[in-house]
Amino acid sequence: MRGHDTGSETTFSVTFHGVRGSTPCHGDDIMRYGGNTSCVSVLSSGSQPILFDLGTGLRYFGKECLTRDTKFVGTCLLTHSHFDHTQGLPFFAPLLNDETVLTVRGPVQDDGMSLKAVFDKLVSPPLFPVGLSHIPGTISFVDTPNSDFMIDDVHVKARAIPHVGATLGFRIELNGKSIAYLSDHQQPTDGSHGISDGARELVEGADLLIHDSQFTPQEFAVKSTWGHCTAEYAVWVATTHGVKNLALFHHSRQFRDVLGHVPTSVVVVTGIDSDGAPQGITIGSFVSVSLEPPLVGFLPGIQSKTWNALKETGKFCVNVLAENQADVCWRFAKESDDRFAGIEWAPSLNGAPAIAGSLAHIDCNLHSDALYGDHYFVVGQVTHLHTPTGVSPHAMAFYRGKVVEVAFPE
């Protein structure tokens, strides 16, 4: 998952190389979020590269590093020593260069075991073919308590947070911008919404919060002592502490992968923003809500800049995509300024872009939008309907990470 900028003049560039919790996984059904475990890179002009955690996503970050240089000099802020946050280290390709210097800062174990001792145990026979001493690059392990320190010009705050075993959360700050990282965060076991002083200190007013979202409420009810939380809890943390952007992290495989087997319709919601520019966003969750009055619904993510621009005008057009419009689907799935380049469209009756080739155009006024977990549930009041002639009769659906054709039997 690529790039989140924390300001118009980019201070930090954030890339998600692994977002899964517990175990890596693969298959078409997990393509949307990827299958690698926790690893996030942060690049800035104010410091060497900074990594959050060393899960299997680190291998792919290492591949990217090799496209720029064969060595790497940077720091990892390690939250804790569980497998899903550490198992990428021996597969980090830049460590094969003896000029690579990787500093790893993380917590001492509850029994006093140092960070280096943990990794010496993890990366050694018979668990791994060789020990760390056989790796050409230099790895420096720094036991890190609750503390504040600098990585070049970046200020780092490390605080103990509740999980299972010794665990840190981090906050990094540069030029007035901040990122908080709480990948594994124990919600109060009774399901209530409370927060420790250390965690509050990390998240307060952050420009970007990367936060645990392992369980559904139903899963949490039977796994409340497993060291994690619900997406709803993460949203509460963000909204009650002035966080500007929230990235839900440490995804559980089961919920999303089971729901990945449920096909959903694909549309592009379009409109004209307050500056008069056309905007559009791909939605894979369009539904009919009511016949009388005529209402439709869809669920854009809470991080969508496009939806935030569209809802200001209070009206939009739903373009129901045909099976041969996969290029349109993927173009509008990305946040970019040139999505309409080469796209044939004309104003609908409410003035929003009606994309040529679509199965139907549904003009709506905004009825309501409410926050549920990591998405808004948007309801539109239908004002006009149009079904063009001469287009493909087959619809598009989103199923197991892919767009597929939905055809009627002959």
Image (cartoon, grey):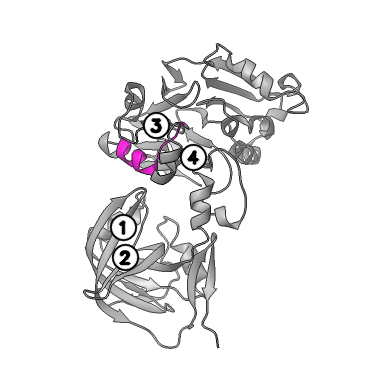
Mark 1 touches mark 2? (CB < 8 Å): yes
Q: Which badge, 3 or 1, comes first in the chain's sequence? A: 3
Vertical comparison of 22 with 325: above or below: above
Tell me if residue 34 can be seen. Answer: yes
Residue 153 % position (x, y): 43, 23
Q: Amino acid at mark 2?
A: Gly
Q: Observer-nearest residue: 323 or 192? A: 192
- How many residues crowd around disc 1 within 10 Å: few (fewer than 14), some, or many (20 or more)? some
Q: Nearer the viewer, mark 4 or mark 3?
A: 4
**Magenta stretch contains residue 235:** yes
Q: Amino acid at mark 4?
A: His
Checking the image for residue 377, the label placed there is: 1
The residue tagged with tag 4: helix, strand or loop? loop
From the image, tell me which residue sits under label 2.
297
From the image, tell me which residue sits under label 4.
250
From the image, tell me which residue sits under label 3.
180
Q: Which residues are magenta?
A: 227-238
Real-space CA distance between mark 3 and mark 1, rounded to the nearest whole angstrom: 26 Å
